[in-house]
């Protein structure tokens, strides 16, 4: 087995992801409920969640769902929302560069925001085992499938209103993950620029994914410009 | 348990472009050696992605969400338990949302 991918790493990733599942559960419920409301069967809901595995994109696609299914519109909407994942894969280069073949392209296939965040915290602690990423991703995938299923089956009975505080769990999860990602004061400038640029794009009326992309690119460019001037 | 062809086509389209997004950024990086500026950017990208995702999400929800987010951040910094920090964030938002109703119920004319 290559050094870059171990079963022990996968087990550690799985344990790390379990602590986060509570933050992802409400999101899965919402997607299951939305799919049920749009008339998708349980099988269709699970095939979608299993293959796409991207909550925000699925919600947006389901919002514009119709009968027959809007193939082009759903595909385009999902493409735009998920553009934010492209820089994530690039940022994981130190981990992925040591892989090839199925390990490499399979690891990327299950890449998801929260597993990415855990892997970044792991990288910054000096560990580069891609098994950790896949273990965390697959744990979140399993949780995702269960919660989408529960949402589809019991959604009509639960009926949580859209603005309910439990849906804040996914935001709170990302907020908490910021702590292990923080490297110290050198992160302050890029993070402030990223937040300000995202708020400006949001305030200008731009929808997803433009605030995220604008913030991510401008923030990291500000950090890079400062770093290169220093050295 | 039905699986309609039009629904399946839409799902496969969604899945294909999602994989393109997941793998595409790294695939480009693997075949081209990026200039130093881009390499320096990649070091900063992860944190910036999440900050840029969170700021508009909190702005949409209003000030109680900012307070709840700060509570989750503080809980994580002090105690280091992710599940607990998530619960703290949700509980604080729930409390702040319930507060005005409870106050106007308790205070006459409030």
Image: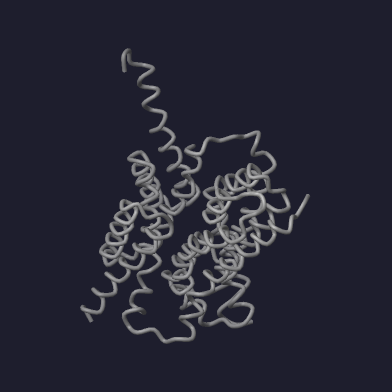
- Foreground residue among B109 and A201: A201
Q: How many marks?
A: 0
- In terms of depth relative to the viewer, which is nearer, B101 or A210? A210
Quadrant of res B95: top left
Does residue A214 sit above or below A27 in this rendering? below
Tell me which corner region of the image, top left, top right, bottom left or bottom right, holds residue B71: top left
Could you tell me residue A187's position as x and y percent?
30, 65
Q: Is residue A136 positioned above or below A168 on the image?
A: below
> How is the model colour-coded?
one colour
Task: Name the image quarter holding the N terminus of chain A.
Answer: bottom right
In this view, which residue lies farthest toward the left? A229
Q: Residue at x 36, y 48 (%)?
A: B74
In the picture as drawn, the residue positioned furthest to the right comes out as B1
On-image quarter of the C terminus of chain A:
bottom left
Instruction: Pinpoint residue B90: horizontal percent, then vertical percent.
Output: 45, 41
Q: Residue B62 location in percent, x, y?
A: 35, 41
Left or right, B26 with respect to A150, comes to left
- Residue A51 is situated, as x and y percent measured from the top left of the image, at 64, 62
The relative height of residue B64 versus residue A149 in the rendered view (above or below) is above
Observer-nearest of A98 and A36: A36
Outermost residue, top side: B108
């Amino acid at each position: 087995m290559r050094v870059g991918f171990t079963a022990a790493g996968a087990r550690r990733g799985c344990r790390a992801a379990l602590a986060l599942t509570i933050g992802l559960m409400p999101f899965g419920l919402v997607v299951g409920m939305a799919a049920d409301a749009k008339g998708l069967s349980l099988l269709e809901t699970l095939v979608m969640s299993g293959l796409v595995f991207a909550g925000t994109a699925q919600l947006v696609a389901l919002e514009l769902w119709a009968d027959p299914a809007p193939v082009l519109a759903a595909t385009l909407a999902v493409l735009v929302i998920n553009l934010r994942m492209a820089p994530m894969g690039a940022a994981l280069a130190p981990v992925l560069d040591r892989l090839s073949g199925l390990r490499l392209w399979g690891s990327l296939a299950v890449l998801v925001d929260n597993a990415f965040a855990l892997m970044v915290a792991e990288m910054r602690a000096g560990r580069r085992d891609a098994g950790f990423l896949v273990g965390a991703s697959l744990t979140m995938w399993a949780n995702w499938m269960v919660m989408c299923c529960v949402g589809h089956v019991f959604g009509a009975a639960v009926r949580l209103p859209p603005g309910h505080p439990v849906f804040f769990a996914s935001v709170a999860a990302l907020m908490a993950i910021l702590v292990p990602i923080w490297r110290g004061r050198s992160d302050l400038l890029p993070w402030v620029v990223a937040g300000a640029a995202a708020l400006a794009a949001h305030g200008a009326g731009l929808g997803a994914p433009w605030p995220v992309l604008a913030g991510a690119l401008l923030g990291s460019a500000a950090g890079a410009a400062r770093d290169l001037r220093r050295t | 348990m039905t699986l309609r062809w039009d629904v399946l086509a839409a799902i496969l389209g969604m899945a294909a472009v999602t994989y393109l997004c997941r793998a595409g950024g790294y695939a480009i990086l693997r075949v081209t050696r990026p200039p130093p500026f881009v390499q320096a950017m990649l070091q900063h990208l992860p944190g910036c992605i999440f900050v840029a995702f969170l700021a508009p999400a909190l702005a949409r929800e209003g000030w109680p969400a900012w307070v709840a987010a700060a509570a989750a951040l503080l809980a994580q910094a002090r105690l280091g338990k992710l599940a607990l920090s998530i619960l703290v964030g949700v509980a604080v938002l729930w409390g702040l949302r319930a507060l005005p109703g409870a106050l106007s119920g308790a205070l006459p004319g409030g």
